[in-house]
Amino acid sequence: MAGNKVEFLEWSFTKLSESIRTKEISPVEVVEESIKYIEQTNTKINAFITVMYDEAAEKAKKAESEILRGEYKGTLHGVPIGLKDIIYTKGTRTTFGAERYKDFIPNMNAEIVNKLDVSGAIIIGKQNLHQFAYGTTGDRSFFGPTLNPKNTEKVTGGSSAGGAAAVAADMCYASIGSDTGGSIRIPASFCGIVGMKPTYGLVSKHGSMALSWSLDHLGPMTKTVKDNALLLNAIAGYDSKDPQSDKSQPTIDFSSLLGKSIKNLRIGVPSSFYFDIIQEEVLEKFEKVIDLLKSQGVEIVPVKLEHMDELLISQQVVISTESFTSLENEVSEAPEMIDDEVRSRILGGMLTQASDYIRMLRMKNFGIEMFKNAMRDIDLMVTPTICALPSDIEQRVVYFDEKKEHPRIFARLTGPTNTVGFPSLSVPGGKSSNGLPIGIQFIGRPYEETTLYQVGYALEQLIN
């Protein structure tokens, strides 16, 4: 975004952290300049719902004192980041992008907030979203649509719209988003940043709004792959307060393979589904990325994934049913306070029969085995993140040659890994002819985020 800003706001937080560590730049200065730029830019793209002026200033002074005393905590110490406004922050309103909760102030912090506090990160504000985290476009919020900083006539993607827009516009160094069907990866792709949906159960969801408990994930949104891996290091880990948290998860340094050669890695490309409905420019950019990977000695292997449409349908039924259960009070007690489009989607879950819901849940186990078998002889898979370029704000049609689709199509290529819980990383893969970002999705086996970061980092270096 155009505007007056100091150079360090454009940096990755990995680069910034070195200047903070060596005391060349103060966390107080970083927060002051960040807030100044947020005030200047937020009127243009509407990425933040609440800016935490006093809290951020206080944390910045604390970080500065700690660093001056020689108590530097690591790369996140003194770094301003944003939170999707479904994540509870004690004493600061958490709205879910909804009128009913416009003044809701939690009396607790989400576990992810506690982890960020331990790392020394500074939460600078709460970010806009598609209302109740239920939508692929990011233009349905009580607080107004978030606009794409790459082209403000286009959607950011959803539902973690404000998080992606804020990072892309240099309003903060990173964001925490949620992803139920692609809600981190879709806006990351549309805004040209890096977004990770981690392995299911890797990051605690305690203290965040539940849309669909069997599909919800929290994850990092950043400017670079290295930043993403380091932020995941800070937020991952077992939490007894989250029933879905995996107690058996390994302790991993997710940055450990960054910069390692990708030569001889076997990367699978699905032979169907991911390319059945796709815009030509997206396909062309994907094919160029494949050529780049081949140039580094990667072996591209065709893989077969069957019954993917059924898996996608199961994901849609599960999210619809569970969202109605989660938000039943909202739609029954104050339906007029919910966006029409969002309310319609929630109410759709009321029609699901219990037997259908159970049958769709069983598809998860089938999907897990299918993905495991497909990845038995490869290291990871690569696909486009989204089958289309971003649509216009408020537009509800996406064009594929002669065919028209609803923007729900944006989640077609991301939704399956929510169902199976496998990690999926979206990294920028280039731009369209009119300058719109196009994302590339890497899919790995559970707890193999390090491999996704290894290849994502290599692609990032090749493109940059």
Image (cartoon, grey):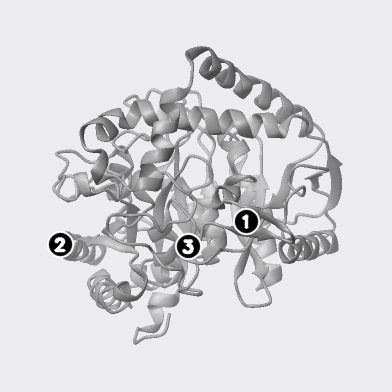
According to the image, label 1 marks what residue?
258
Q: Quadrant of the N terminus?
A: bottom left
Residue 190 coordinates in the image, percent (x, y): 55, 63
According to the image, label 2 marks what residue?
58
Camera-side residue: 454 or 305? 305
From the viewer's perspective, tell me whether residue 150 is left or right of residue 97: right
Gap in Å between the C-alphas at discs 1 and 3?
28 Å
According to the image, label 3 marks what residue?
156
Residue 410 coordinates in the image, percent (x, y): 58, 51
Q: Quadrant of the C terminus?
A: bottom right
Gap in Å between the C-alphas at discs 1 and 2?
34 Å
Q: Nearer the viewer, mark 1 or mark 3?
A: 3
Residue extending farthest to the bottom is: 4
Q: Nearer the viewer, mark 1 or mark 2?
A: 2
Q: Residue at x 66, y 60 (%)?
A: 399
Tell me the kind of residue under disc 3.
Thr
Lower sequence index among marks 1 and 2: 2
Camera-side residue: 369 or 414? 414
Q: Is residue 38 visible?
A: yes
Q: Nearer the viewer, mark 3 or mark 2?
A: 3
Secondary structure category for the residue under label 3: loop
When asked about the image quadrant of residue 207, the answer is top left
Tell me the kind of residue under disc 2.
Glu
Q: Residues within 10 Å of mark 2 (few under 14, many from 20)?
A: some
Q: Residues within 10 Å of mark 1 (few under 14, many from 20)?
A: many
